[in-house]
Structures are given as structure tokens and as C-alpha cells.
């Protein structure tokens, strides 16, 4: 079963956000998916917007590009702070991360 099938999102409509309160600053996410995640000077990870800017507002989300879905999911699975949340855009249900069912 593919990652897309497991998430129930064959259309690719997923978004990701990071809970900086739980971020340990290990940078694993930025290693897996540097197009989506980046560490800031405060040592915490943030998601990046369409223009490659860091989205630092609390709970800021960014779309998960389908070609990077596996890397983003691996980031969520490997994150020691369990702070990466991947959810469906349509109903906001978390499909990967600490609150996934």
C-alpha cells in the first residue's frame, strides 16, 4: 500500500505543521524534506511557504507536495519531539504524527 493510499488522500490534499513547543531542534525534518522544513536561528523547525519563507505563526501550515509526501511522513515518524503533524486539508484529520488515529 502506498503512502497516499494509507492516508486516504489519492488527490494529495495534505498539509503539515510543526508544534514548536515540542520541537527538539534535531533537524531530522530538514534533512528529510528541506523543501518543506527549515531550522531557524532560534534552533526550532518551521514549515516553509510557497516562496521558501519560514512560516513562524503558531500553527502555520503548508501544503505537502505529493512528490515529497514520503519524505514528510518519514520526518513525522522519525521526529524525536513528535511535533510534526500531517493532516488532510478537507477535514483536518491528522493522518501522520502524534495525533494520528
Image (cartoon, rainbow, N blue to C red):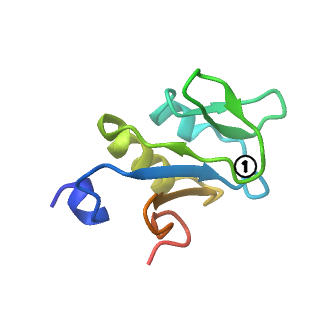
Q: How many marks?
A: 1
Residue drawn at 53 percent across, 50 percent down: 16
Q: Give the farthest residue toward the right.
A: 42
Q: Quadrant of residue 8?
A: bottom left
Q: Residue furthest front?
A: 90
Above-or-below relation of 58 to 46:
below
Q: Position of residue 19 (x, y in %)?
A: 70, 55
What is the x, y in percent for residue 29?
54, 40
Q: In the image, 98: left or right of 24?
A: left
Q: Which residue is mark 1?
A: 24
The image shows residue 76 at horizontal and vertical percentages of: 50, 53
Q: Is residue 74 above or below residue 91?
A: above
Which element is circle 1 on?
loop
Q: Residue at x 63, y 30 (%)?
A: 38
Q: Check the image and name the residue furthest to the left.
A: 1
- Residue at 47 percent across and 33 percent down: it is 33
Q: Is residue 100 above or below residue 90?
A: below
Locate the N terminus by quadrant.
bottom left
In the rendered structure, the answer to whether residue 30 lies left or right of residue 55 reads left
Quadrant (top left, top right, bottom left, bottom right) of the C terminus: bottom left
Instruction: Answer left or right for 13 relative to 81.
Output: left
Residue at the image point whose x is 69% and y is 30% from the top: 54
How far from the left and from the top, in percent, is residue 87? 47, 61
Foreground residue among 62 and 85:
62
Amino acid at each position: 500500500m502506498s503512502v497516499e493510499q494509507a492516508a486516504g488522500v489519492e488527490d494529495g490534499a495534505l498539509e503539515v505543521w510543526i508544534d514548536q513547543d515540542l520541537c527538539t531542534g534535531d533537524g531530522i525534518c530538514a534533512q528529510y524534506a528541506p523543501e518543506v522544513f527549515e531550522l531557524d536561528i532560534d534552533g526550532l523547525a518551521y514549515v516553509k511557504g510557497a516562496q521558501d519563507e519560514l512560516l513562524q505563526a503558531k500553527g502555520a501550515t503548508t501544503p505537502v507536495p505529493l512528490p515529497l509526501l514520503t519524505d514528510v511522513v518519514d520526518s513525522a515518524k522519525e521526529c524525536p519531539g513528535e511535533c510534526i503533524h500531517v493532516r488532510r486539508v478537507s477535514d483536518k484529520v491528522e493522518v501522520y504524527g502524534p495525533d494520528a488515529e
